[in-house]
């Protein structure tokens, strides 16, 4: 009886160890250190900010596409050349800490925060992982 209990205990501990090892391996393959932004590039960021500051939608989109930056999600479903100025203002309001103006602009653009519920949470996670219906666009 003692051997069976010990065997089951070792089996459970071994299973937990293998699952943990597999999870850590996946994290290591995806960039490992999640305390840093592995894809952040200051030069690209500066170019994006410059394009946004100058109101150059085409340049901003081109930089994002050339560097494999995300092009899906709610923001990109509503973003176009016609409302790029509002996005620029929204970014400026966020950087200046003007959260009242930020909320107004989000509402104008249809980006106001939705209440968190199970279905929308899963939908947002799928989009962030590139699995949403607009993936790869």
Image (spheres, rainbow, N blue to C red):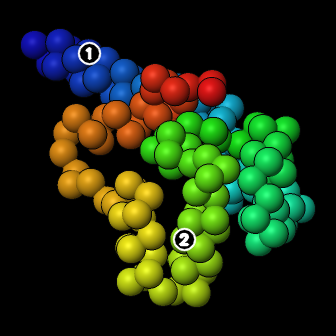
Few, some or many C-alpha atoms within 10 Å of disc 1 (few <14, some 14-19, many ≥20)?
A: few
The residue closer to the viewer here, 8 or 40, is 40
Q: Quadrant of residue 117?
A: top left
Circle 2 residue: 90
Q: Quadrant of residue 118?
A: top left
Please, is residue 66 above or below residue 36 in the view?
A: above
Please, is residue 84 above or below residue 61 in the view?
A: below
Q: Position of residue 137 (x, y in %)?
A: 63, 27
Query: Real-space Cα distance between discs 2 and 1?
Result: 60 Å
Report if residue 2 is visible in the image: yes
- In the rendered image, the residue lying farthest to the front is 82
Circle 1 residue: 7
Q: Which mark is residue 109?
A: none
Please, is residue 70 above or below residue 109 in the view?
A: above
Q: Position of residue 130 (x, y in %)?
A: 54, 29
Residue under the point 22% across and 17% down: 8
Residue under the point 56% across and 66% down: 86
Position of 6 with respect to 126 (left or right) is: left
Q: Position of residue 116 (x, y in %)?
A: 22, 51
Sequence-wise, which precedes: disc 2 or disc 1?
A: 1
| SS under mark 1 | helix
């Amino acid at each position: 009886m003692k051997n069976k209990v010990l065997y089951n205990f070792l089996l459970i501990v071994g299973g937990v160890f293998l699952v943990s090892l597999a999870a850590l391996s996946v994290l290591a393959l995806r960039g490992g250190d999640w305390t840093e932004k592995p894809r952040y590039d200051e030069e690209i960021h500066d170019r994006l900010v410059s394009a946004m500051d100058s109101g150059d939608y085409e340049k901003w989109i081109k930089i994002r596409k050339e560097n494999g930056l995300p092009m899906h999600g709610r923001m990109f479903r509503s973003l176009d050349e016609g409302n790029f100025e509002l996005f620029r203002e929204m970014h400026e309001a966020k950087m200046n800490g003007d959260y009242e103006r930020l909320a107004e602009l989000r509402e104008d653009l249809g980006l106001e925060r939705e209440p968190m519920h199970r279905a929308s949470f899963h939908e947002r996670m799928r989009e962030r992982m590139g699995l949403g219906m607009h993936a790869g666009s």
